Image (cartoon, rainbow, N blue to C red):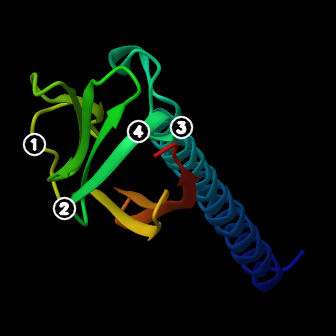
Amino acid sequence: MTFIELQLAVLFMAFLSATVIMYMASFQQMRNEHQANLKLSMNAENIVTKMIWGSQGSKGIGIRSANSLQLISATQVRYTDTNGNTHEIRLNGQNIEYRLNGNVWIAIYDPNGSKNADPTTYSTNLTFTQTAPTALQIQLVVGQKTQRKWNYASLSTQVAYRN
C-alpha cells in the first residue's frame, strides 16, 4: 500500500466515523422529540378528561354533569352540577386551574411544577366555545421547548351537558 492509498483509507475511515456519529446524534434527537410529543399528548388527554369527567377534587363531576353552564371568557367556564355545587375551570398564564364553590384555585395542569411557568419554555392555550345551548367545545394546545425546538400537542372536543 502506497502512502497516498494509506491517506485515502484514513480519510475514508474518518468520513465513515463522522457519518456514524452524526446519525447517532440525529437518532437521539428524534428519540427525545418523540418522548416530548408523547408526554405532551398524554398531558392534553388527561387535562381534557379531567375537565369533562371530573377528578377527585371535583368529586368526579365534570362539565358533562353541568346543570347550567356560563362562559365567563373564552378561557374560563363556570358550571353548576346537579347537587348545586359551582365549578370553575380557567387558563391562568400557562396553568389550567379548577375550583369548587369559590374555594382556592387548584392547578389541574402545571407544566413545570411552579406557580408561574416560563413562557419561553412552556406554552398552554385553552379556549371554550359554546356551540349549542347544551354543548361546549374545548380546544387545548400544550407545548414545550426542548433542545431549541418547540413540540406541541393539541386536542379539540365537544361535550354535551345536561342543562
Image coordinates for residue 33, horizontal then vertical, percent: 55, 56
For residue 140, side relative to residue 116 (left or right): right
Foreground pick, 36 / 131 = 131
Considering the numbered disc 4 on the image, is that residue within a helix, a strand or a loop?
A: strand
Sequence-wise, the earlier of marks 1 and 3 is 3
Q: Of circles 2 and 4, which is in front? A: 4
Q: Which label belongs to residue 116?
A: 1
Give the amino acid type for the residue marked by disc 2 in the picture: Thr
Residue tagged by mark 3?
49
Q: Amino acid at mark 1?
A: Asn
Q: Secondary structure at mark 2?
A: loop
> 23 or 9: nearer the eye?
23
Q: Disc 4 and disc 3: Cα gap in Å? A: 19 Å
Of badges 1 and 3, nearer the viewer stands 3
Which one is closest to the eye, mark 2 or mark 1?
Answer: 1
- Residue drawn at x 55%, y 52% is 159
Q: Is residue 121 visible?
A: no
Mark 1 neighbour class, 10 Å CA radius: few under 14, some 14 to 19, many 20 or more: few
Q: Residue at x 78, y 74 (%)?
A: 6
The residue most toward the bottom is 4
Q: CA distance from mark 1 to mark 3?
A: 23 Å
Using the numbered discs, state the Cα–Cα distance from disc 2 to disc 3 in whole angstroms. Answer: 27 Å
For the point 72% across and 61% down, the residue is 20
Checking the image for residue 67, the label placed there is 4
